[in-house]
Image: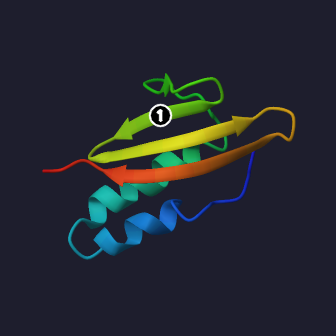
Amino acid sequence: MGGPVGAGGPQRGTGFLKDDPQGVDTLLQATDGLTESPRPEGSRAWGVHHRRLHRGPWRILNRIDEEARTLHIEHIGRTRE
């Protein structure tokens, strides 16, 4: 399952690359993994079509469109430290 990445997609994390390269790598691995497993262990339902996943300090909100067979990453956020 693949799909477009919106304005809140993985490029959001690149601003943290200099300060936290390992954390950004964790984020990118998590978003890449969603293409193979859109409902990974540890994620939880967020409404009817959305899932929320935490990986390290990152929160990933994605929407699954079963009919179109696409996964949309709608928001990536970072928890406050």
- Quadrant of the rendered structure where residue 17 is? bottom left
* Residue at left offset 58%, top offset 50%: 73
* Residue at left offset 44%, top offset 35%: 53
Give the vertical position of 36 relative to 39 (above or below).
below
Image coordinates of residue 45 in percent, x first then y, are 53, 23
Disc 1 residue crowd, few under 14, some 14–19, many 20+, Cα 10 Å: some
Image coordinates of residue 13 in percent, x first then y, are 39, 64
Give the vertical position of 24 relative to 65 (above or below).
below
Which residue occupies the foreground of this view, 51 or 26? 51
Give the vertical position of 26 relative to 10 (above or below).
above
**Quick check: 50 left or right of 64?**
left
Image coordinates of residue 2 in percent, x first then y, are 74, 50
Q: Mark 1 = which residue?
A: 52
Task: Indicate how the structure is coloured in the image.
Answer: rainbow
* Residue at left offset 56%, top offset 44%: 33
* Residue at left offset 69%, top offset 36%: 64
Which residue occupies the foreground of this view, 9 or 17? 9
- Quadrant of the rendered structure where residue 62 is? top right
